[in-house]
Image (spheres, rainbow, N blue to C red):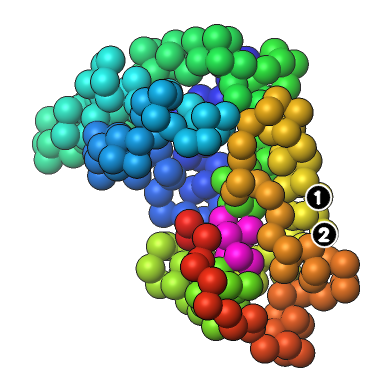
Amino acid sequence: SSLQVAQVDGAITDFGMAIGPLTMGDLAGNDIGYLVRTSQKLTDPNQRQPANMRYSSLSDELVTRYNRVGQKAKKGWYDYTTTTTNKKLIPQPSTQVSQLIQQHCLLKNAMVLPCTSSTVQLQKEEIVERLLFPLVNEGFKVLQEAVARHPHDIDIIYIYGYGWPSWRGGPMYWADYQIGLPHILKKLQQWSQQCQDHNLDCPYLIPSPLLQQCVSQNMTIHDYYNKHQPNKNNKKPSSKL
């Protein structure tokens, strides 16, 4: 059992985003992402550091084996047809991509994700959690490292710069007041432990110390910033946000 492309995109658009991440990849060009990963020495397992990094080559094979670079080739995560009137591209599910996903699910053991079992199916809520909880975790890291001065800074950037649905208040507000930090921490700890159990390096799933501190003190991140000054130091930021 494996998730399909439209399920991932659908969960995010139902959440309120204008476009799903895989549709965005097709729009921008999947080859661009591949070239970026290649420049970071991620696509070659002999160069990848650390060697046990959790990494799926699925999106790499999409480009290198099948030339599914996106809308410009009329095939990417989706197949594309054009309307006869205005030549608008219409996405359609791809049998080839579905088969490739299933092959990875079976051969790669899905790198700890739920298609390791035919009885496990992710619901929309958990798809959103798996995509966005690591983002919130990075938000805590940039706050702890004083890269951002206040949670509001992150929220404003994501609302006005990345299309975050404004009625959800931004990722940090959403984490504080719509989800709850204890739930986010619990999920990150669960996923991080799954990686450790499989000897995989998943740093983005390791809960931020600031997140853990807020939960231990029963505080929201906004409460914390009303009582404390950001931690200013000269350390090089490690966040990838």
Residue 136 within the segment the image draws in magenta:
yes
Is 145 drawn above or below residue 4 in the view shown? below
Q: Check whether the beta carbons of the residues at disc 1 and disc 2 lie within 8 A of each other.
A: yes
Image point 12% across, 30% down: which residue?
84
Is 19 drawn above or below residue 53 in the view shown? below
Picture quadrant of residue 194: top right
Q: Is residue 111 visible?
A: yes
Numbered mark located on residue 235 in the image: none
The magenta segment: 135-141
**Quarter of the figure that contains the N terminus:** top right
Q: Main secondary structure of the magenta part?
A: helix
Numbered mark located on residue 182 in the image: 2
Q: Amino acid at mark 2?
A: Pro
Residue 53 within the segment the image draws in magenta:
no
Alpha carbons under labels 1 and 2: distance apart: 6 Å
SS for dot 2: helix
Residue that carries the numbered disc 1 in the rendered image: 186
Image point 59% across, 21% down: which residue?
110
